[in-house]
Amino acid sequence: MYNERGAARRPFFEAGIPAERASASEGSPPEAALKSKIYNIWFITPLLVVFIVLFIIPMFISFFFSLTIWNLTDFRFVGLYNFRTFFSEHSLNIGIKNTLIYSTMTSGLKVVLALAIAVLLTSQIKSKHFVRSLVFFPNLVSTIAVGITFRSLMHPTRGLFNTLLERIGIEGPNWLGNPDIALYSVISTDVWKGLSIASVIYIAGLQAIPDTYYEAASIDGVGKWQRFRFITLPLVRSSMNSVIILSFIGGIRSFDMIMAMTGGGPGFATDTLALVIYKQYAFGFFGISTAGNVIMFFMIVLIVFPLYRFIISREVEF
């Protein structure tokens, strides 16, 4: 742009700005970017320090002590002996099997049952807000309290479950004393407690789906099952992924529910990996228990991370 004398006209936003300030402003973007980067680093640094101190350093210390036999005053390097012992002893490696069964079944049941409950509670039913409160109630009770309560309910002679079954002429099983069904009894209790938070996650996902999809499907004469299959199920997949990951990791780390209900018994029938680690610490086998912690860490890494990448790749955006 030029003025009346043919000289180049300065932009209006530079009018009145001295030449030295204008030239300084031209070099300011790199300086501003540098200051912004330093500013961001200062925000990240405290969290990074906490992460390194409370996670990274203890992780490497655990890796080292899993290769030793140690106590509170001394240690002796033994290589992979603790891991060989863990995988060769039935009383120890059964925890890995039970953990996989426990995490898979609790996760799968929560995914399916919580979705059914959430679909019901987002439909046009009466008193659905009251029913939502009832569904969420188990999450307000501590896991230990739930375990102790269900241990009493599942008592073979004085428990409520067997008393009701006896009233209708059915002999109730020994829910927690029979090695064949004890683990599944604990799993059912865990699912009952975990359905509440899983249902809330699903309800949030269902309410985020635009009504226009259902209205268009209704105009086209699409039935309820087709709407659920082709609209609800794909668009609620992000919530489903959250339920899968959270419940699966929770199943791998499960300890308090089993400890309150069976303590790992009868025998080793309900021992999970977390419970085996606790017992080895209690008995003074610190090296084996530390090796169990490392095994649990790699179980989560090798199972959950690929599972997460797989289910994220199948999400549908809307």
Image (cartoon, helix red, strand yellow):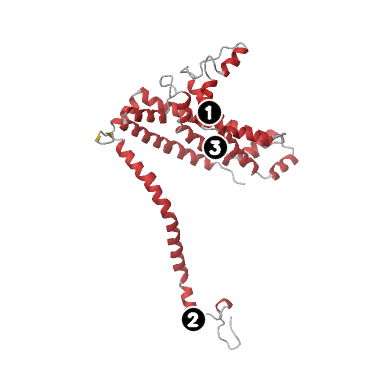
Q: Mark 2 to mark 3: distance in Å?
A: 61 Å
Residue designated by label 3: 243
The three-letter amino acid code for the residue at tag 2 is: Ala
Mark found first going from the N terminus, 1 or 3: 1
- Who is closer to the viewer here, 138 or 227? 138
How crowded pointer 3 is (Cα within 10 Å; few <14, some 14-19, many 20+) is rated as many
Residue designated by label 1: 146
The quadrant in which residue 72 appears is top left
Disc number lying in front (1 or 3)? 1
Residue 187 in the figure: left or right of residue 63? right
Label 3: which secondary element: helix
Residue designated by label 2: 19
The three-letter amino acid code for the residue at tag 3 is: Val
Label 1: which secondary element: helix
Q: Mark 1 to mark 3: distance in Å?
A: 21 Å
Quarter of the image for the N terminus: give it.
bottom right
